[in-house]
Amino acid sequence: MNAARNTAGEPVPAPPPTILVVEEDVLVRNLAAAYLRDGGFEVIEANSADEAIRALQAEVLVDIVFSDIEMPGSMDGFGLAQWVRRERPWLKVILTSGAVRTAKEARGLREQGPILAKPYDHAELERHIRSLLALIVLKAE
């Protein structure tokens, strides 16, 4: 694979991966987003699945969606993951929740990525994101 080059012929570094963080609780969302930004990621924030879908429909380039399951609006995190699977099948989704859902619901979305229980460790979240990004790179090669 040829790396992009600038006008001087020097390699241009690839842009950092972009994570869409979907969480209604502004404090939880801000903490996760700040941690990911400190880890070198670009972060887009949304407070609901509806807002996340609007961002994705605006053709915002996103590598991974990290979403809470329990949210207000027209759909929850499971609904968002199903929308992503249908409309943007190349995107990976990581779900998180403090509430327990049925194994059947979780099993149907498992291939999209891990489900993290709240409260989650930010370092654990970053490990999951980097693992999914590595899988994406492997599939592209």
Image: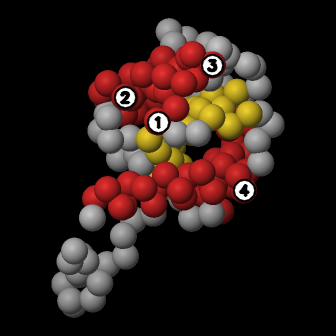
Quarter of the view holding residue 99? top right
Give me the disc on residue 85: 2
Does dot 2 land on a helix, a strand or a loop?
Answer: helix
Specify the amino acid type for callout 1.
Answer: Gln
Nearest to N terminus: mark 3 or mark 4: 3
Q: Nearer the viewer, residue 70 or 33?
A: 70
Distance (Cα) linking label 4 and label 2: 26 Å
On the image, numbered disc 1 is attached to which residue?
112
Specify the amino acid type for callout 3.
Answer: Ala
Nearest to N terminus: mark 1 or mark 2: 2
Q: Nearer the viewer, residue 106 or 116?
A: 106
Give me the disc on residue 123: 4
- Callout 1: few (<14), some (14-19), or many (20+) C-alpha neighbours within 10 Å? many
Does dot 4 land on a helix, a strand or a loop?
Answer: helix
As drawn, the residue found furthest toward the right would be: 119
Distance (Cα) linking label 3 and label 2: 19 Å
- Callout 4: few (<14), some (14-19), or many (20+) C-alpha neighbours within 10 Å? few
Image marks 3 and 1: residues in contact by CB distance under 8 Å: no
